[in-house]
Image (cartoon, grey):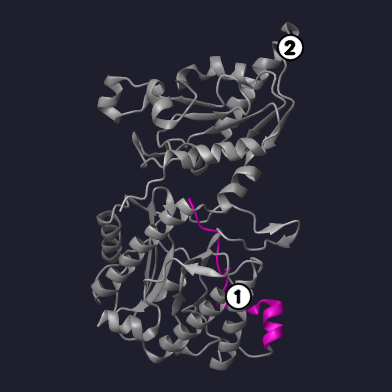
Amino acid sequence: MSVTLEPQEYARRRQQLMAAMSPNSIAIIPSAPLTTRNRDVEHPFRQDSDFYYLSGFSEEHAVLVLLPGREHGEYVLFCQEKIKEQEIWTGRRVGPEAAPEVLGADDAFPVTDIDDILPGLLEGKDRIYACLGVRQDFDHQLMMWVNHIKTQVRNGATPPREFCALDHLLHEMRLVKSDAELTVMREAAIISADAHKRAMTMVKPGMMEYQLEAEILRTFMDAGSRWPAYPSIVGSGENGCILHYTQNNAVIKDGDLILIDAGCELDYYAADITRTFPANGKFSEPQKALYQLVLDAQLAAIEQVKPGNHWNQPHEAAVKVLVDGLLALGLMQGDAAEIIEQESYRQFYMHKTGHWLGMDVHDVGEYRVDGEWRVLEPGMVLTIEPGLYISPDDESVDEQWRGIGIRIEDDVAVTADGCEVLTVDVPKAIDAIEDLMA
């Protein structure tokens, strides 16, 4: 299934952004830099999400410029020239000549000419929109262009009067997904769900964690996803208590729980799923008790995902269920309301219940507006991921609980009348997991 976004989607975004910019302004967005892995080898290139959101262009060494109201074209792109000798070494390029047809640019120039051309586009503008403070090298280059204009003031040049953070406008746009974006995210969720189900059916004690990771990556690629959205977490036994464990180099033992947090990236959109299951296919009684508690908390949190509720309501619902359950199991003592107020539950549950999801796995968008929790709106996508992590060294609890780490995570889209769980295909009920693994 092809889910690549149409060029019209990128054009609509550029127009929406320019409509929100002030008159006589300019927006400048650079591509992501190449990052050295070691010596003369680079990490695989992944385009900057803001840049790709507005362009659909995946090449490095490029700069996107938007000039609302410009008579000769509002969308200007600087990119690498199409030079055959260089393409032999580093791959095919679009090039400035083809960029108008392929990418919808009104004008395109070689990026090597940017120092000569961009100051002229900046000159006379009242406001520059840019994501300042993200890349120090580009901030420096931008200031050099502005300072060049300042040297020409006696000749009548007018430098820009102010800088404005582009992030506020652009990230508010990215927070609410279009129907086309949700279609891509549903497909990413389906692929990622298949990978988790494959891991459940392939696992056996004695495997290495990274062998299970390999099965997940294989499923992603077989389905058309070239990359994971983030480094996969495959934590068996005590490793499941490490929130961002990515070494994945331990032997999976009989009796271990395995916590897998993995999702694919599809056309620059992320899925993010966590499931926890027994290596031998059967939960022990302590594992079952804690797992059901986390599942109950997750289901309670998902019920709170609907328009009009605020961002923190799912977290509040999850915490209440977890605290009541921890008291019932004897892992905590005291008054539930006091435990919640003092956040002493963080001994076992130390993170929030979710985050925004989109082009970045921890996606952009403010969680508070004017000091208040943001109200959920249709088109927003978030994760719901409560967990419990009982440290193997925690002598305050009975030994049967120690070393158990559990997280259950789904991707949830806010709809007009409630929510849609995009990752519903992965089993999470105890019986359903044990049946699949059998």
Image quarter where the N terminus lies is bottom left
In the picture, residue 341 is in which quadrant? Answer: bottom right
Residue 131 visible to the viewer: no
Residue 55 disc label: none
Dot 1 corresponds to which residue? 346
Which numbered disc, 2 or 1, marks the residue closer to the eye? 2
In this rendered view, identify the residue nearer to me: 51 or 43.
51
**Point 41% across, 86% down: residue:** 287
Name the disc covering residue 153, or none.
2
Going by the image, does 279 lie left or right of 69?
Answer: left
User: Mark 2 or mark 1: which comes first in sequence?
Assistant: 2
- The crowd level at tag 2 (other Cα within 10 Å; few <14, some 14-19, many 20+) is few
Span of residues in magenta: 336-360
User: What amino acid is found at the position of numbered circle 1 in the picture?
Assistant: Arg
Rendered location of residue 437, percent (x, y) = 27, 80
Image x and y of residue 235, in percent = 38, 69
| Secondary structure of residue under mark 2 | helix
Hey, what amino acid is under mark 2?
Val
